[in-house]
Amino acid sequence: MRGLGYVLFVALASAALFEGLTRLVPSVPARVASLEPERIWEDRFLEMMRRDRQFIAGGFHSPHPTRGWIVSPNVRKTVDGFAYTTNERGHRSLNAYRRDPAKYTVLAIGDSFTFGMETNDTATWPYLLEERDPRLQVINLGVSGYGVDQMYITLRETIADYAPDAVVVAFIGDDLRRVLLSFRDYKKPRFVLRGDQLELTNVPIGSPDDIIAELETRRRWADRSLAARFARGAFRQLLGLTSPPDAEPLREGDLTLVTRLFDEMRGLAREHRAEFLLTYLSYGEGIFDASRSEEGEAFLRDYGMRQGVATLDTRPFFTEQPRKDWVKGHFQLRENLVVRDAVATRLSQLLAGRRPTLASEGAGEYELTLARAAP
């Protein structure tokens, strides 16, 4: 027993020494946090709920049992000088939804870049796409913070209702990693592969009060110990239970999961006789420097070649222009005009065979003129 006590004493003393040393190195807390990115989002959620009971930035979202959160319907709100309007279905739109069978219905699925965070209602790329061509009815189903998994669930739950002619899934590189999180802005669904089957876990999503109670129940003394958090985070990373730090590439199994989700979306579009266009949205430093390597762009290229899927990479449409004043964050009007014209050009090619009018009526207007697209 004396030997066991000595071993226990040494173990506790070593842990205490390690704990003290980790707090003296400035880079350690950030590294520990990167091993468990969900915890950063959980802390942010709890802080926002304590401050103003706003569970997602902007204050115009509602919990959803399978998607985590959705855009609330009938929003009329100005946040940081930007006007946000949604219709009775929660689309970012100035108009009530009415299906128009005389038009091509296009579903725009995506995250905050598609929804249009930090830009006005009339400056989002789905709005601009519909405005450019009156033959299109574009439904903006983008939601801030969404990963590819939530995009898939959105499409799965809505495509039969909208019966689209085309589905445009627009993603940024980080959307691939969000698939591996169980919590981001809020508790979210998480798919896992069981053999060759997708299994949806972490649902149903509860109310904000339910989530607060759940988080507070899970938080123990170990959350205050950097050493314990490091050990727990490293173990979760080893088992592939969460997203790897940004500086590390996605693992092979992670890419397999993301690929499967895109396959399912493409299958849904095919089942409902809709064209499918997978679109990569580059932003930040990537739209200034064509030589940069981007994880999302590489995935798009590889996936398109392997699966024979129609794809669109928007980055060349930015980098081919000698501009130095693109915004590095969420797109504003100028950036969304570029995306609009790139999507319009690709859609015209995909939809041309569906009805003679799209090929014959003013086909020349779809010749992309970048100088005109970004005044």
Image (tube, rainbow, N blue to C red):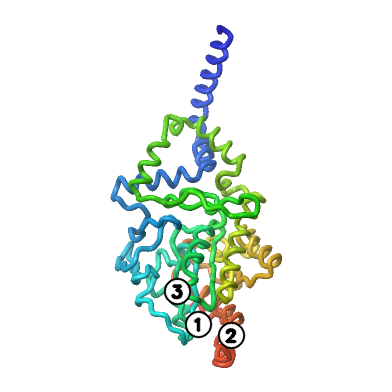
Residue 177: x and y in percent read: 56, 53
Q: Residues within 10 Å of mark 1 (few under 14, many from 20)?
A: some
Q: Check the image and name the residue furthest to the right.
A: 306
- Give the answer, above or below, for where 194 lies relative to 315: above
According to the picture, the residue beneath numbered tag 2 turns out to be 354
Q: Secondary structure at mark 2?
A: loop
Q: Secondary structure at mark 3?
A: strand
Quadrant of res 68: bottom left
Quarter of the N terminus within the rendering: top right
Q: Earlier in the sequence, mark 3 or mark 2?
A: 3
Q: Residues within 10 Å of mark 2 (few under 14, many from 20)?
A: few
Q: CA distance from mark 1 to mark 3?
A: 11 Å
Q: Check the image and name the residue furthest to the top.
A: 2
The amino acid marked with disc number 1 is Tyr
Residue at left 58%, top 55%?
A: 198
The amino acid marked with disc number 2 is Arg
Residue 368: x and y in percent read: 57, 81
Q: Nearer the viewer, residue 51 or 294?
A: 51
Q: Nearer the viewer, residue 214 or 113?
A: 214
Asked if residue 1 shows in the view, the reply is yes
- Give the answer, above or below, for where 242 lies relative to 7: below
The amino acid marked with disc number 3 is Ile
Q: Earlier in the sequence, mark 2 or mark 1?
A: 1
| Image mark for residue 139 | 3
Q: Are marks 3 and 2 in contact (CB under 8 Å)?
A: no
Q: Earlier in the sequence, mark 1 or mark 3?
A: 1
Q: CA distance from mark 3 to mark 2?
A: 19 Å
Q: Are marks 2 and 1 in contact (CB under 8 Å)?
A: yes
Quadrant of res 300: bottom right
Q: Residues within 10 Å of mark 3 (few under 14, many from 20)?
A: many
Residue at left 58%, top 91%?
A: 356
| Image mark for residue 104 | 1
